[in-house]
Image (cartoon, coloured by chain):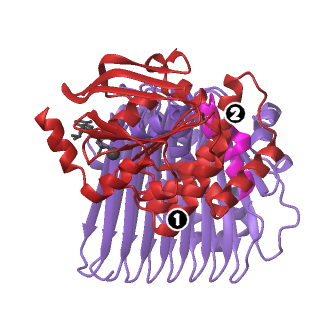
Amino acid sequence: MTAATASRYTAEYSNIAPTLPGQNLPWLTALRQDALAKFSAQGFPSLREEEWRYTNISAIEKKLFSPSLIGQVQELVPTELLASYQLPDAWSVVLIDGHFCAELSALEGMPETVSVMSMANALIKKSEILETYINKAVNNDEHSFVAFNTAWFTDGLFVHVPSTLVLEKPVQVLYVNTQSDALASTRTVIIAEEMADIKVIETFIGLDIAYLSAAVTEVFVGVNADVTLYKMQCESALAYHFGGIYVKQAKDARFIHHNFAFGGLLARCDIHTDLDLASECELNGLYLGVNRQHIDNHTRINHLKPHGISRELYKGVLDDKARGVFQGRVIVAEDAQKTDSQMNNRNLLLSNDAEADTKPQLEIYADDVKCAHGVTVGQLDEKSIFYLQSRCIDEETARNMLTFAFANEMVDKIKIKSVHDQALEQVLIRFPQEGVNKEWL
Amino acid sequence: MLSIKNLTVNVNDKQILKGINLEIKPGEIHAIMGPNGSGKSTLSHILSGKAGYTVTGGSVTYQGKDLLEMAPEIRAREGVFLAFQYPVEIPGVSNIYLLKAALNSIRKHHSQPEVDAMDFLTLIKDKVRLLEMDEKFLYRAVNEGFSGGEKKRNEILQMAILEPKLCILDETDSGLDIDALKVVAEGVNSLRAADRSFVMVTHYQRLLDYIKPDFVHVLANGQIVKSGGAELALELEEKGYSWLEDSKAAI
Ligand SMILES: Nc1ncnc2c1ncn2[C@@H]1O[C@H](COP(=O)(O)OP(=O)(O)O)[C@@H](O)[C@H]1O
Ligand SMILES: [Mg+2]
């Protein structure tokens, strides 16, 4: 991209900087300055970069998204929108246009030893901890969107679970967007200490307007700890979304991610995880594209030490002129013997104009490993359609049933009922459901 | 019930069925036997409406209507049921879901209200017991990961629940051990009724030890070369098919 586009953002930065949280923290100021310098020099990623070959973000460059300031937002809170996504059985943290909204959040009854608070608040109360975690699972050199996020983030979620604590109820963070052409840049940090167990749901929603949502989440899974993270990306159909989830897994740590990419005109999500000795990760993904949506998912599983296990399944359903991209890298370091890794990407194309680009990459430097991968891009199976027809189901319903079933495999992996039901609802509203009966499922 | 007249069928310009004639009356059981590749599955598929076949001549009349004109799902709703030689796995669609969808499609077709949830459960549990299946199968995806025998049992379970008028069983005996074969046969026999007919496609007669046919037809090279009673199956068991294929070749 042109330096001019970056400079439009950087020119604005001096106005915004004084409003950003953590002003008094020299380490953060230094991080932000470093990030700003890197972003100014590079601009947004371009198609020439290998990792961005399929992601044309020129539409983002053409606009200038400005961060909304605190206090602009409260009267605009879209209560109906929020009500349909806020989970009844979870603690919740609500961020409106990148700012924590205490009135709408619900954290009563949280065990005292657990910290769940807004990032802005954590930068006041937990700054020593944050200093050792922010930008430690990713850094400003990863790519310029991360640098952009580091420089601009206004708020986010902070979660810290002490060792051996199992948090029974999940924590939901809702990133809500209500303003046209606004930028919501958020940084979330989740820390599960040794043998802790936590489930977090990140839900992205917005009014029917164009905005840019740039959210970076860093996750630290301690020794033998469990983190399950859900991402429900239900942005507006006009929105731009960039999400990055960067995970560090300690020895024996387990990380499970469910990535549902439903919304956005252009949505990209990067998920990187580093596995230590005998740690395990499971990456599940479902992307549904209609109209002219462009949905991009990039995963990187980094086996650094022996005996790691990774399981990855991403499925895409693409209709109309939608385009889905899956880039999945599995890296097995020389030291990571006995790694057991499986990666799969399956795409279902419902129209001749839909497109799926899939690029699995295995980079294996160890010699005693079990690594498998597979990709498919195809249409509905005619044999299956006929089988259903022979069982009294008309062809259109048969197609809907099979499409739904294809997607529903990912929904069925969700163990929290309210999250499961929400994902199911999202799948059903996005595809023709004539003949698909939710009550019978 | 079913009247097939001089039916000729091509697949990819190759003639597979070469003039089939068959009359099936209500309540009758017809066995169609013949060597591999003689066209038995093709005939089953044609009756149930699978795409990819070209009917080049003849007619099929079912309950007074032109069967070949009907979409596959209409045939099914009108009472034609094919138990597949190779049942298809449908990941993500549970058995019970499919059964409910199918049963309600039939009811809707006949302007009846949807089946009551409790009645439905009672009905399927009865049939599951009849076929000595585990109830867990109901909640598993259709045929997914089922053994060959389990798939065949599942086909008969569907048939027992949908109560078709014309049941076509394509090689239902293959892949079944003797105990499973008896269970399946019992399931079929329990469905015998004055207004229900069966077409049993097989190339062994062992299923016919348990389900006694009224007529046996031998299909060879796309034609019915011999028809007779149940005793014909025994004759075939003894002599094989070659004498019929040879005699046909001599004609
Ligand atoms: N789709 C197809 N394309 C080409 N030939 C086919 C096709 N389906 C069946 N056939 C041929 O038709 C003949 C009859 O097959 P089939 O009906 O399956 O026989 P059977 O069930 O008696 O074993 C065989 O010669 C088979 O190879
Ligand atoms: Mg056959």
Chain letter for the part of the structure drawn in purple? A
Question: Mark 1 Cα within 10 Å, few/some/many (few <14, many 20+)?
Answer: some
Would you say residue A143 is visible in this rendering? no
Which image quadrant: the N terminus of chain B?
top right
Would you say residue A93 is visible in this rendering? yes
Chain letter for the part of the structure drawn in red? B
Of the numbered discs 1 and 2, the one sitting upstream in the chain is: 2
Location of residue A218 in the rendering, given as x and y in whole percent from the top left corner: 55, 63
Location of residue A225 in the rendering, given as x and y in whole percent from the top left corner: 60, 78
Determine whether B26 is above or below B148 in the image. Answer: above
Figure quadrant, ligand 1: top left
Identify the disc placed on residue B104: 2
Secondary structure at badge 1 equals helix
Closer to us: A198 or A150: A198
State left or right for residue A271 relative to residue A165. Answer: left
Which image quadrant: the C terminus of chain B?
top left
Labels 1 and 2 in the same subunit: yes
